Image (cartoon, grey):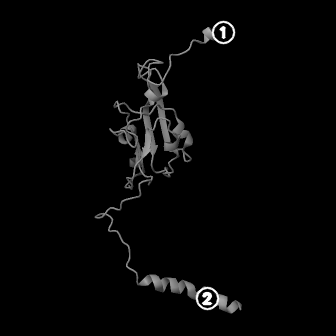
Amino acid sequence: MHIWRDISGTLQPFWVTLRNMFRKPVTVQYPEQHREPPPRYRARLILTCDPDGEERCVACHLCSAACPVDCISMQATEAADGRRYAAWFRINFTRCIFCGLCTEACPTLAIQVTNDYELAGRDPLKLVYEKKDLLVDHCGQEPDYNFYRQAGIGVAAPRGGNQTESAPVDVKDLLP
């Protein structure tokens, strides 16, 4: 009975080929026609701004720590009003595997993925994107989120001055 199993194992791939030979092929003429990727497709990374127009990135280095291929690097600095931001931010797209772990790790929703999949190039140095290449002038997928208003850090408003905050407590008043 092994002979019938071997014969069916040999003829079955031919049947699959014969069945698909007469179907209409699905071909996209790429440069003229662009395929629309699914909504959750992960491609090019961008840095977004908050609703006030300031950049969201606070240079906490969580995205670079979460990146499994270590393609994100940045340098943190602080503005005169106490707001942290990235002095420079760099993503090496020749190493990026588009896993999306950096977007999951970002507490400020600054780094987000888009469905722009046209990143091909012959020069690897042109695929190292700097902050000016990544920064966009819109809020991305979360247009109303502002980290400094949500976190209660005394930059957008004094501590305890936000809508959902109470005034700070002096810990010395709690001593007996």
- Which dot, 1 or 2, sits closer to the camera? 1
**Depth order, front residue of 124/15:** 15
The location of residue 140, given as percent across then percent down, is 38, 42
Sequence-earlier tag: 1 or 2: 2
**52 on left or right of 78:** left
Q: Is residue 133 above or below residue 8?
A: above
Q: Is residue 49 above or below residue 115?
A: above
**Depth order, front residue of 56/93:** 56
Q: Mark 1 packing: few (<14 Cα in 10 Å), some, or many (20+)?
A: few
Q: Residue furthest left?
A: 32
Residue at the spot of label 2:
8
Q: Secondary structure at mark 1?
A: loop
Are dots 1 and 2 in contact, CB under 8 Å? Answer: no
Measured in 3D between alpha carbons, the distance from the residue under mark 1 to the one under mark 2, in whole angstroms, is: 84 Å
Q: Residue furthest right?
A: 1
Q: Mark 2 packing: few (<14 Cα in 10 Å), some, or many (20+)?
A: few
Q: Secondary structure at mark 2?
A: helix
The location of residue 51, given as percent across then percent down, is 35, 33
The location of residue 172, given as percent across then percent down, is 61, 9
Image quadrant assignment for residue 65: top right
Q: Quadrant of the C terminus?
A: top right
Q: Residue at x 41, y 58 (%)?
A: 38
The location of residue 112, given as percent across then percent down, is 43, 44
Q: Is residue 74 above or below residue 126?
A: above
**Depth order, front residue of 129/31:** 31
**Depth order, front residue of 10/96:** 10
Q: Is residue 18 above or below residue 76?
A: below
Q: Which amino acid, mark 2?
A: Ser
Residue at the spot of label 1:
175
Q: Which amino acid, mark 1?
A: Leu
